[in-house]
Image: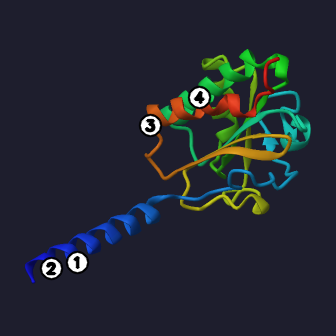
Amino acid sequence: MKMYRIAGLSLAMALLAGAVFAAEKLQSGPQVNEDVPGPFHPYNVTGKAAGRKNCLYCQNGANPVAVVFAREVTPQVTKLIKRLDECTAKNADCRMGSYVVFLCDKEGLDKELKELADKEKLEHIVLSIDNPAGPQEYKISKDADVTVLLYTKHIVKSNYAFKKGELKDQDIEAIVNDVPKILPEKK
């Protein structure tokens, strides 16, 4: 009888652990192998269309793209942006593009982003601002503080979503290590 209790308790613990793990996995934005939903027009703070609304999805076309949807400027988001700017520069021959869409209506955010771009010497990644909900078709979770999509030919190859405070250095490394998934194969 004792054996059945132990087996039953073990099964219950395994099911509970599985449920907790499944509940913790945050989904935000289009998932791997799904189409990127398409055009939207955030206000561009930096880049070729600085000072106006511009479709960065359209601007990048079928090229390899890293896009970050973030709710606020944090040291970790800044670190991620800087690393993606470096990746974009390194892969310019592949016409890689990258942009960040801050989902926020904070007063003065445009000035803060210009200062960030200058301070961090961001030259290849575009910083932009959209409404707090983000583009509706992209289904950015309200619980996601940061959502990262790596896509090429309008197909998502990697998707990362983080709740507030969850983005860590090892996550940034994992994202950067996934960039080759969107680059053309070298011949």
Residue 166 vs 142, above or below: the answer is above
N-terminal of the pair, mark 2 or mark 3, is 2
Q: Which element carries disc 1, helix, strand or loop?
A: helix
N-terminal of the pair, mark 3 or mark 1, is 1
**Residue at left 48%, top 41%?**
167
Q: Would you name the residue on which mark 2 appears?
A: 5
Q: Would you name the residue on which mark 1 appears?
A: 8
Camera-nearest label, 3 or 1 = 1
Q: Would you name the residue on which mark 4 appears?
A: 177
Amino acid type of the residue that numbered disc 2 sits on in the rendered structure: Arg
Camera-nearest label, 2 or 3 = 2
Q: Would you name the residue on which mark 3 appears?
A: 168
Quadrant (top left/top right/bottom left/bottom right) for the C terminus: top right
**Residue at left 81%, top 27%?**
184
| Disc 2 to disc 1: CB gap under 8 Å | yes
Residue 107 vs 20, above or below: the answer is above
N-terminal of the pair, mark 4 or mark 3, is 3
| Disc 4 to disc 3: CB gap under 8 Å | no
